[in-house]
Amino acid sequence: MNDKREETDRRDARHRAAMQKQKARVDAAIQAANVERGVAVLLTGNGKGKSSSAFGMVMRALGYGQKVAVVQFIKGEQLSGEEIYLREQCPQVSLYQMGTGFTWDTQDRSGDMAAARETWAVASAALADPGYDLVVLDELTYMLSFDYLPQDEVLQAITSRPVGQSVVVTGRGGGSALQAVMDTVSEVREVKHAYKSGIKARQGVDY
């Protein structure tokens, strides 16, 4: 019985020591992060959840009473739960959708490019507006990958936005130049997807 108690005490002591070291590292990192400004976040990769994560940040910003703009490239033909919620429950959020649907459905490069330019005009105006605390550019990466928008213009707008404004960009790819100007880059990697097992997209989960 005593041996078990002694082993438990030793395990607890090792745990406390490890947690003290970890806390010291975390505290030091927090102390070193002393720059106060908006951040640029890129959510990329071939896995599910990039836009979902961005909309989670929208909810977080709204919790603090911040002003938010959401501009969606590609999406817009099929109604989504986030669109319904924002339009009905969050009228204070500025929401704009390109509305052409997926480029592989339209198969109209010139039409898609014209729609992308119109949508980018809305997005760039939001990026230049210091009244917005958070700007979400959903699926913007495709506009760069397909050469629908000039990369230099997009990067310039992101890097020259108001100092207190944060921006979130989502979508696969986008190129190394985009990654280079972002503060945080997270890659969502697909390990397994229900769709590949023949399971239909689900309301409230997939759209």
Image (cartoon, grey):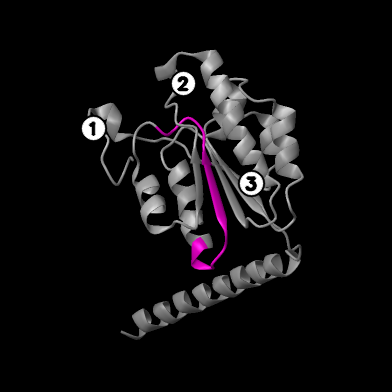
Nearer to us: label 3 or label 2: 3
At label 1, counting other C-alpha atoms closer than 10 Å, the crowd grade (few under 14, some 14-19, many 20 or more) is few
The amino acid type, in three-letter code, at marker 2 is Thr
* Mark linked to residue 200: 1
At label 3, counting other C-alpha atoms closer than 10 Å, the crowd grade (few under 14, some 14-19, many 20 or more) is many
* Circle 2 SS class: helix
Q: Are marks 1 and 2 in contact (CB under 8 Å)?
A: no
* Circle 1 SS class: loop
Nearer to us: label 1 or label 3: 3
On screen, residue 168 versus residue 79, left or right, reads right
* Mark linked to residue 126: 3
Q: Is residue 173 visible?
A: no
Disc 3 versus disc 2: distance between alpha carbons? Answer: 24 Å
Disc 1 versus disc 2: distance between alpha carbons? Answer: 21 Å
Residue with the mark numbered 2: 103
Span colored in magenta: 62-76
